Amino acid sequence: MTYPAAADLTLTAAIAATALPLAAFAVILLLTRGFPRLSAALSIAAISVALVCAGLLLVRHGHLETPLEYSTLWMAGGDIVVRVGFLIDPLSLLMLMIVAVICFLVQVYSLGYMAGDPGFARYYAFMSLFAWAMMNLTLAASLLQLYIFWELVGLSSYLLIGFWYEKFSASEAGKKAFVMTRLGDVAFFIGILLVLLNFGNLSILELNSPRAGFLPPAVVTVSALLIFGGIVGKSAQFPLLTWLPDAMEGPTPVSALLHSATMVAAGVYLLARLFPFFSMSPAALQVCLAVGAVSMLLSATMAMVSRDIKQVWAYSTISQLGLMIMGLAAGDYVAGVFHLTTHAGFKALLFLCAGVFIHACGGNDMFEIGRRGARHLKIPMICMIIAAAALSGVPPLSGFFSKELILAALAGRPSPIWLAAGLLGAFLTTYYTFRLIFIILFPRGEAQAKDAHADGHNSEAGYRVMAAPLIVLAAVTGVLGFGGHALGRFLLQGFPGPVPGAGHPTWLPFAALGATAAAVGLAWFEFGRRGADQVGFVERVEPLRELFRRRWYIDDAYRWLLDHVLYRVFSAFCAKNDQKVIDGAVDGLGGSMAAAGRILAVLHTGSVQFRLLVVSVVLILLGLYYFVYPLN
Amino acid sequence: MNGWALFGPELFVFGAALVFLALCLVKSPSPRRDFMVALSLAALVVVAGLAALKAQGTLFAEAYRVDLFSQVFKVLLALGLFLVICLCSRLNGVEARHHPEFYLLLFICTLAMMLLSSAVHLLSIYIALELSSYSLYVLVSLRRARQMAMEASLKFFLVGITASAVMLLGLALLYGATGAVTVHELARILPGAADRPLVQVGLMLTLCGFFFKLAVFPFHVWAPDVYQGAAHPATAFIATASKIGAVAVLVRLAAASEESGTYLAHALVALSILSMTVGNLAAIAQKDLKRMFAYSSIAQAGYVLIGILSMSPDGYAAAIFYCLALLVMKFTGFLVLVAVAFDGANIEIAELAGLHRRSPLLAMALMTSLFSLAGIPPTIGFTGKFLIFNAAIAQGHLPLVLIAMVNVVISLYYYLMVVKAAYLLEPALDPPPMQLPAAVNVLAVALVAFMVVFGVYPQAFIEMARFAAAALLK
């Protein structure tokens, strides 16, 4: 790898961007925990510098012919080489920028949202920890390094979901998220080991190079699927999807940052990162496509019956991540990454708006929020409508363009079922989105008495601090869609994988728009128009509503598996083995050792004469040994 | 190089001892003043040792050799002295009027060990050894709890003079058989005289004097009583610094007798196994923390012996490295002991209950030091044991290493019992949180960091030990 003359500045910027949040984390935890405002200032200062560095990197390397890699040897043994360092290419630069921007905006927003919380400094420390881990994940040059930060991101997610740890449901949700994502991570790690054993190298560039094509196809498929297991966990895809809605127990800015825009998107990012590698195995891509489609549809149905505003956006996140995975798996790299980018913007915006409403109205129930006059909060209401329209794919907002690209990629598949799934997904998405919008815009009935808790936080300054990031994100959502072509060109520089063929059936945009329009119309008929009873068509069918509300009984299935298989059979066996075999052996051994020890200790309590006698005997034996030992 | 400059650190320590001799004569006792003087002088000793690290030459008609090997050990000794004096800020196990004497003996003993690490003439070795032993006999007896201290001191003395007598017999046999008076002459003559019983047995008996210092079986019998009977800082000194000098001279003698046949190696293997096994098994039954430390020291001496009996440069380097590791690990244990036993009395292991709530930092320091003693990665104790076992396997001592590993597992049992007491047992009545001086906290953090950081990146110290071992063989 040759280093251009500009290498130094690039490296400095990369190091600064990835190291400063860690420094902020350490300083806050060790020194400034008692000073909330100072802690927040430190954290925001660190992320601002990181943002500037990310921008600088993006500008410097806007035209990057070949990926830059700075790496140093970390471990080498036999045929196995593990390097660590930074990998700078269009994809990592784009993701770094997304992470830095959203982190920055969310941290500013949190100044208002978290004001007065007793754990204010701790909150900013964890936010910095997350920013550090996420940025390192983005720039990681080898799979192992990526995995380390992947786990650290998971840790910060656990800490932030359970941020209000006095609340039982919050700490439970943190645990659930941790355990469920860990299931996927185990598969991921086995996949990494498989790659290491067969390929002898974990460098992402090497894996994506044609050299990896010499691996046996079965190895590629199996390791790709195992790595995809990690993606399923992190991006909350089927069947590991139920942790994400529960993760909404964390503070809303955390949901906006981790559980919609960046951390859960890390799974999709990994898929894009290893896209050329995955492309070597059509079978693995087919599995990804199916998992993406199932997750997208299942979670969309769950969103249709939820009353909790954050839960709706959480289901929507799962659904959109599924859509991105479908886009990538259908072979369109640009479409998937483009949707990742636009989604980060509008989904963060949706969560931040929801945060303002929750803050103002003191509850998560969308009917209650509507009744308490959320529509009078002009800025968040307008921003939320913009973001919702983008999510639904209404032109000319960003979501329209990126969704269009993905649908075009799906249309290119031989089987029409994927396109049908995509269009159905688009319909359902629009339906549940506008269901929520109409419920909040046109409330029915009287608000219940406000509790004192809600009013406590309603300060004007806090509101203004929270509004600023909303406006920025809304502007981004408005214009980002037009950058699609430029983004595509940027991403494809030096891209080693297959480039999808352009062109899609001309009727496709009309079909998509038709689905959107139909869904908005249905939502209007059921929730918006005067005299609508605000009960959706799904909610009228009791079994269907129950099925969706119980999340297709996925959690119940897990519970059953835990109770009947894991606890009753497996744990019982292990416990018995532990008690009877291991404990028995250890106790026996320990008992005899302790007895021997007591005997020896008795030997040592004798008088001095006795001890000196022992010394002499040993010396005589040693001396005698000299005359015996030549014999043997 | 100028002879006086070569002798610099020793002269400085001697001067410091004279300062305390003068302070002994001052009527009014002032523990604070004595402590501050001792602390600053000990810090200067470390500086002097470091300044003379690169010194090289011989003194006193070839009886005294200054090389990298001896200088590294002098730095370790100085460090040990400094650390032990750090423990003396509240020296309430010793009466205030005896404090100057206490420091005087510490400095004299350090001086003797420094002489020991450089001495190459058999007689100067003997005299240095006796000087260090006698100062320790008195040091042990200085404790406020007179009866226990006198008993311990007397046992120490009786075992010590027996060992000295045995050693003198060995020296006489060796001299009679070879006519050699310095270690280097011995190294030259031994290969030709290896088959003579007088030489072999003489060598074996000569080493007994150092086995006594190192508390190797069968000369370990003083250790439990002395550890228990001496004041805490004195015990810490005996457990850490006083072992270093013995290791230095043992390594020197072993290097000289590499060519003397296999008898010596066989005998050392037997003693090493016995030390480890007896130490570890007896430690299990202990209730008193200091007695437990004593038996643990006996077992650790067995591990050190494995490095020495490998009789290879790697083995010596491993022994030197492990010496440094032991110094830090054991000292950390004593730091916690002194902090917990604030009134200077002995404590039982069970009295550590609830330590993690009274002082999380100390509990962590204790845990790290015990894990390190037990050889759990990533601590420096693990690295040290790894080096020793590696060197021994390279010399074909696989069965010995296997026995040592079994012993490591046994030792884990009683180390974990202490950790359990500190972390899991609930105290009968809730003692208040401990108020520790900031210096103790800083020291504890530094020691823990040292044990972990240099357990992960030990390269610098391994290099140093290799260079020192190489200087030995020149």
Image: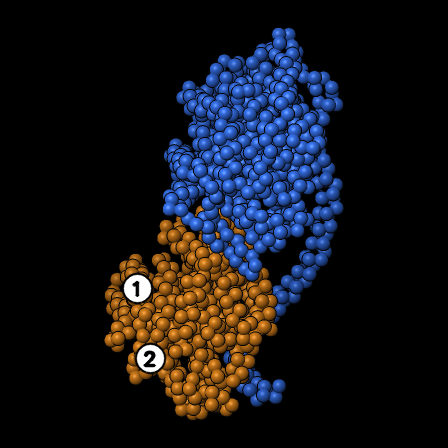
Chain colours: A blue, B orange
Amino acid under disc 2: Tyr
Q: Is residue B367 above or below residue A296?
A: below
Tell which of B294 and B225 is nearer to you: B294
| Residue A89 located left or right of residue A41 | right
Residue that carries the numbered disc 2 in the rendered image = B64
For mark 1, give the secondary structure.
helix
Determine whether, in the image, residue B445 is placed left or right of residue A600: left
User: Whole-percent x and y of residue A571?
Assistant: 71, 47
Residue wearing tag 1: B47
Bin the neighbour count of mark 2 within 10 Å (Cα to Cα): few under 14, some 14-19, many 20 and up. many
Say what secondary structure mark 2 lies in.
Answer: strand
Please state which of residues B460 and B206 is positioned toward the viewer in this rendering.
Answer: B460
Q: Which image quadrant: the N terminus of chain B?
A: bottom left
Q: Quadrant of residue A50?
A: top left
Is residue B418 positioned above or below A381 on the image? Answer: below
> Which residue is painted at 45% across and 27% down in the image?
A109
